[in-house]
Structures are given as C-alpha cells and as structure tokens.
Image (cartoon, rainbow, N blue to C red):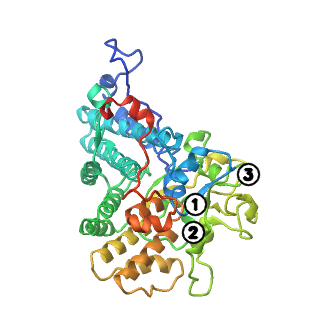
Amino acid sequence: MKKNILIISVLALGAMTASCGFLDEELKGDYTSETYYSNSEQAVMATNAIYNGLYGNTLWHFGDVASDDSVKGGNAGDQADITSIDNFTAVSDNGCLSTYWQKGYELIARANNVIEFVPAINMEETLKARLIAEAKFLRAYQYFNLVNIFGPLPLKTKPQLTSDAIHVGLSPVEDVYSLIVSDLNAAIKDLPESYITDKGRATVGSARALLAKVYLFQKNYSGCLEQIQAVKALGLYELVEDYSSLFADGGEDTPECIFAIRYSNDNTASLGNNLNVWFSPAEEGGYYFNAPTQDYVNCFTETTTDGKTDPRLDASIGRDGQPWFNDNTFNKSWSEATGYLVKKYNERLSETLAKAQSTVPQHIIRYADVLLMEAEALNESGKSGADEPLNQVRARAGLAATSASTQADLRNAIRVERRRELGFEFHRWFDVMRYGKEYAQSVLPDLPKDTERFYFPIPIGETETNQGLK
C-alpha cells in the first residue's frame, strides 16, 4: 500500500454553463460557490480537486503518438480517433481532442475557483498562500500543454459564473505564455521546498523547473538558465543510479523526481495509473496501444563503455526476447503494429493489484530533463559548458562522454539524448514542434507542409458553445 501519497478529493466545484442564460433561483444542494469557500478544510479540498484533474490524462496521444516515437498501436480498427492524431488528419469532432480539451479546462476551472475564492477565507495565511500557489502552478502546467497542442486559446482565468467568463475569445500564443510565466513566478514565492507529509504537491522546485522549460520553449535561454541554477541551488535533486527504478513503485520518491502524478493501489480504481492497461499486451488484459517505432529503437546507436546495450532502451520498451514482467519474455507478436510495446508504466501483476491500479508514477519533470534543458540553453546561447550536463545524463546510462564539439554537433547530440532519456514520458512531440518546421518535417513525413507550426483544431464542442469564438 502506498504511503504519503496525496489523496485527491473528487470535488467538482466548477463551471456551469447555460445556452439560454442563468437561472436566478439558488442551487439546490449543500453549497454554492459563494458559501463553500468558508474555512481552511474546504480550501484544501478544493485545491486537492485540481490535482484530481491530472488523473486519467491522455497526453500520450500527443506527446508520443503524434511524434516519431510511436504509432497508435492496438487493434487496427480500434480507436480511430487516435489514428487521426497519429497521421495529422484530426478534425474538430475528433474525440481525443474533445477529451483532452474538456479535462484540461476542467482542471483550469477548478484552479480558477481556488485563486478567486480562497483569498477571502479567514484562515492561516501561510497555508492560504501555498494553496493559491499550488493552483497557479497547476493552471500554468495545463495551459502550457494546451497552448502547445492547440495554439491560440480561450484564456479563462475567472470562475465560470458569468457569461463573460464562459464566452471567451482566442488569445494569441504569446498572451497564454505571459499568463503561464506570471502564474509560475507567483507560485515560486509561496511554494515550499518540500513536504514532510502530503507528498506529491507542487514545490518551489516544481515551479522553477517548469518555468525553465517555458523559457526554453520561448528561446529565452538566459531565463531558462537562471531558473535551472535556482533549482540546483536547492540541493534536493540528483540523478539516481538505476534508471529503471524511476518507473517502478516508489519512483516518485527518488531525488530525481521534481514533480510527478502519484497513484494509489487501494480500491479506488480512478486513483491508480491505468496507462499500463492501455500499453500492456493482450496477454495481460491490456490494449497494446502506443506502439514504439523502429525509428525510436534505431536512435540507440551507442553501446555503454563496457559494450552493452544502453539500459534505457529495455527499461523503456519491450523487445522480442528480452525480459518482460511476471517472469515472461517479451514476444514481438504482442504488438501487431510494430513488434514493440511501452514498458514504462507497466509493473508486475499480483493478486492484490488490479491492472488499472498501477502505482508507477507519471513523471512530469525530473532532474535529467533539467540537465538536458541546461545543456540546450547553454549551447543555443553560444556559451561553453553544454557538454557537462549532457555528459552527466550520458554517464548515468553508462555511455562515454560526448565527442560533439561544435554547436551544431552538440545540438544534435542533445536532441538525441532527450529522445533516449525521456522516451514515452510524453515530451517528444513538444520537442519536435519547437525544434522548428525543417526538423519537424524531416522526422514526420505526414506532417502538413503548408504550415509553419502545426496545431490541432479546437474541438467542435467549444466552437459551437463558446460564443466568444463566433
């Protein structure tokens, strides 16, 4: 049984829309938005409800399947909407787009409620400030994902209680990023470095690491490096010796984890990590989706200094003849699409652990990511020393120091290392897009050629109901 896990209260205090206007009659129930936020216990529960919005996410549809690391997988005729994501033919009625959009804005609505209503509560001020900071961190994280998938967005920052708050027009990408940066800078001021209990909540390290990534995506390399130095100065994070231990029960409690979605294996299935159901073979009751490509396997061109395969490959995917879980050997027939399956998020079955109740964490940001961001920011800004953080990541994998010396060669080496190190943690699509049109089209032949930066269409459910988009 997990210990010290952040248990989420499923609390839906949120948005209420009406196509014909609002009723004057008070809601029938225990609380309204005006009466709920009255004490510290309710403030904590409302903040917990934001974290609940992280569960059951489908970021892998975009981070993995839309990239060159994987294809849809699964039964060939199943989940056609994911196929449309895979080949960039998704239109506005695509169910995958709708699901991610709805869950994303549900999380944002819950965060907006906390940011709006908690300040007025008569409670201990340090706790109040921390809860608001957590809400701003989570809102920033969700907007960061949404803006990189959909581009210009309705920038909703108020509780969904008025027409003006519901019917919001599109804001440019730059404005969305401005809110993200503002939220994270505000969060940094009031988040703690760590928690004795209630582990899993956002920390100042989480906010600074995410802000470093935001700055990197904006090509603000000096800002990125400033945040990374602040993360390092905390003295809390380091690479763990065993890469595979990050993707097992307890991987979220290692010093490499900066922020992760943590899961429980109690009887509440919605609090377990169900990615292992989606990614595991039919032999284990899984659906064998998100099938790694041969191209991903081929990026592992280097052996370790003692002549072995890079250990990250077999820790990340299942390959024919290699050890799998439950004392099994992986068989390529388990993956009809490519012969490979994702190994991260899977774990050994037992009598007390249902398949949908895995406790393997989903890492959002870990220290290796920060080191590779540092290497990239140093290299792209023309500074020396980019090989140092790059080689730290390589050394953990048993690889020799990089031989790259020019800026162009280091750029390629860093990009390859990110792909190996962070495979199937839902980063690759975002990296490919930010590397630019030429790179993206070189690795994604199906990507439309007539656009500088590809974004998926806004779901029809939003365009038909949000009058601000008319």
Residue type beneath disc 1: Ser
The circle on residue 333 is none
**Which one is earlier in the sequence, the residue at label 1 or at label 3?**
1
The residue indicated by pointer 1 is: 70
What amino acid is at disc 3? Answer: Ala
Badge 1 density bin: few <14, some 14–19, many ≥20, Cα 10 Å: many
Disc 2 + disc 1, Cβ < 8 Å: yes
Q: Residues within 10 Å of mark 3 (few under 14, many from 20)?
A: some
Query: Callout 2: 10 Å neighbours few (<14), some, many (20+)?
Result: some
Amino acid type shown at disc 2:
Tyr
Q: The C terminus appears in which quarter of the rendering?
A: top left
Between 420 and 208, the residue placed more toward the observer is 420
Q: How many marks?
A: 3
Q: Is residue 256 visible?
A: no
Within the image, what quadrant is residue 369 found in? bottom left
**Which residue occupies the foreground of this view, 69 or 103?**
69
Q: Are marks 1 and 3 in contact (CB under 8 Å)?
A: no
Q: What secondary structure is marked by label 1?
A: strand
Q: Is residue 71 above or below residue 159?
A: below
Q: Residue at x 45, y 85 (%)?
A: 402
Question: Can residue 300 be seen?
Answer: yes
Whether residue 190 sits left or right of residue 194 in the image: it is left
Residue 387 is situated, as x and y percent measured from the top left of the image, at 38, 82
Q: CA distance from mark 1 to mark 3?
A: 18 Å
Q: Earlier in the sequence, mark 3 or mark 2?
A: 3
Point out residue 407 in the picture as x, y percentages from the top left corner.
34, 81
Residue that label 3 marks: 282
List x then y, in percent, for residue 181. Answer: 26, 53
Mark 2, residue position: 296
Q: Circle 3 sits in a helix, a strand or a loop, which is it?
A: helix
Cα gap from disc 2 to disc 1, whole angstroms: 8 Å
